[in-house]
Amino acid sequence: MDNNNGLAQPVQPQMPINFENFQLDANGNFVDVNALQGTGNPAATTDAFGNSLATPGSSAPAMNNFTKFGLVANGLTGLAGAYNAFNQTRLMEDQLKFQKNITNRNVANSATTTNTQLGNQADLSAQLTTGAEFGSNEFNTERAARFNPVDGSPVG
């Protein structure tokens, strides 16, 4: 008699397979390299492509062409990233220089406008307080005392 009453039984977990220990043989089947070491089987020393799996005097797999390609690709990716970072830094410096030029031009233009307004105020104040004619020595002396221009020099 069936004890599970028609219910499915849970699947027993299996041990995970470490694919680093397996290689394809000439027929395309996975072969456990560690189990074949020292047996004289050619599958223990070469993979399906004929690459050596073990370095002399060691049981660890040697680097095959795919591993070497991966290392070279990672190195090239790192170099490309460094080159891009260098270019980004150069572009940021150019942007900063451009922004500073715009800011300095704006400061100079604002200073010119402000100095014009301050000069007009000094003219009016000098004429009202002294009653002197516009352009006379007394007027110019009073205007110079009241006019304090703004500096519009570039910012570092």
Image (tube, rainbow, N blue to C red):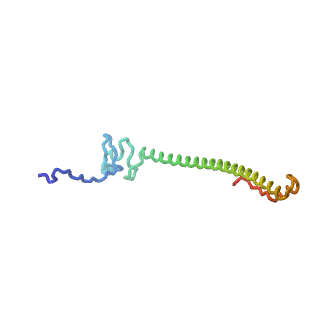
Considering every residue shown, the one lying at the far left of the view is 1
**Residue located at (33% from left, 43% from top):** 24
**Residue located at (24% from left, 53% from top):** 12
* Pick the front one: 94 or 49: 94
Q: How many callouts does the rendering have? A: 0
- 118 vs 77, left or right, is right
**Residue located at (77% from left, 57% from top):** 148
Could you tell me if residue 77 is visible in this image?
yes
Q: Quadrant of residue 147?
A: bottom right
Q: Quadrant of residue 47?
A: top left
Considering every residue shown, the one lying at the far top of the view is 27
* Pick the front one: 81 or 60: 81
* Pick the front one: 1 or 58: 1
Q: Give coordinates of residue 109: x percent, y percent.
A: 72, 49
Q: Is 57 situated above or below 66?
A: below
**Residue located at (33% from left, 45% from top):** 43
* Pick the front one: 47 or 131: 131
- 62 vs 2, left or right, is right
Q: Quadrant of the C terminus?
A: bottom right
Q: Give coordinates of residue 116: x percent, y percent.
A: 76, 51
Could you tell me if residue 143 is visible in this image?
no
Q: Give coordinates of residue 49: x percent, y percent.
A: 37, 41
- 63 vs 102, left or right, is left
- 130 vs 53, left or right, is right
